[in-house]
Image (cartoon, rainbow, N blue to C red):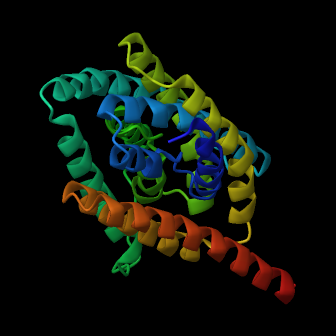
Amino acid sequence: MEFYYFLPLGFFIGIISGFFGIGGGIILTPLLLILGFAPSVAIATSLMLTLGSTVSGTLSHLRLKNVVWRDSLVVGLVGIIGSTIATPIVLRLEEVNGAHLVISIVYIGLLLYFANKFLRPKTTTGSQTGWKNRYLALGFIGLFAGFISSLLGVSGGFIITPLLVGIAGYELKRAVGTSIASALLIVLSGLVNYTVASTDVDLLVGVMLIIGALLGAPIGAKQLAHFDSPFVKKYLGIFYLTVATSVLLEVLHFNTASLIVLIALSLVFLLTLVVYSRKRSVRR
């Protein structure tokens, strides 16, 4: 696959990243595994992409006043610890040819869990949600997200966002902004860890992905302002469920079907943004 193909790929992933605050690696890592990249290379390359998209997304959400900086620093700093723990585990699993399967299973489990959290009807009766100790909740989110970030090659945002909503009591748009800001430290830590471990990463591919993500992320972040939180929650749940299906197909060696699912998901998402935004403009 020629390196310049990764520029438009980074652009599309950047739009998704800016909208959901999930960094983009959630799509790129499975895609690179489908294309035959070694797990550690796929993870490090995805971290390069997410570094670009998180920088751009953070700036965009900062302008939109969606970032709670104090909380994002707590999550990010604790996340460095989790990231540092995960990297040697991945490298060891790769030595025994178990990294691909482990990464895929963890992907599927987490995506299905969070998809269920967003899609199932709420049955609460008005009871208070979230942990009583705010900083304990933020520390747990950071440690867990940091570990998963370096295990899967993601920013950790697809974990941070729902956990900020679920156990820290965040409103969704604030959760998205704070999530992508806290991911900066986590992603940078993971990328440094894999670089020090001499992972063979194609820097040109990474640069193309970053440039594309930098162009696409502000578009996604701007579009988020046009959508209501319930709609975003439902769509995010569907997004997670679809990516989990794609990863499962790849594990079962239906690589072509898995790739088609990822491409279709991206195209439907972009089409939804265009159509829904036009409808909002007409109503106004």
Q: Quadrant of the C terminus?
A: bottom right
Residue at left offset 32%, top offset 70%: 116
- How many numbered badges does the structure rendering display? 0
- Give the residue drawn at x 40%, y 43%: 32
Image quarter of residue 4: top right
Q: What is the x, y in percent for residue 104?
A: 25, 49
Q: x%, y% of residue 114?
A: 35, 61
Residue in the picture at 33% in, 59% down: 111
Does the rendering let one see residue 231?
Answer: yes
Residue 252 x %, y %: 18, 60
Choose between 237 and 153: the one closer to the eye.
Answer: 153
Residue 29 vertical position relative to residue 198 in the rendered view, above or below: below
Residue farthest bottom in this picture: 283
Residue closest to the eye, 49 or 251: 251
Q: Foreground residue, 67 or 88?
A: 88
Q: Pick out the residue farthest to the front.
A: 2
The answer to whether 110 appears left or right of 268 in the picture is left
Residue appearing at x 59%, y 50% in the figure = 9
Residue 176 appears at what percent x and percent y?
58, 53
Reply above or below: 101 against 151.
below
In the rendered image, is residue 128 in sight? no
Asked whether, in this view, residue 261 is left or right of residue 6, the answer is left
Q: Is residue 79 left or right of residue 4?
A: left
Question: Would you place residue 235 above or below residue 57 in this image?
Answer: below
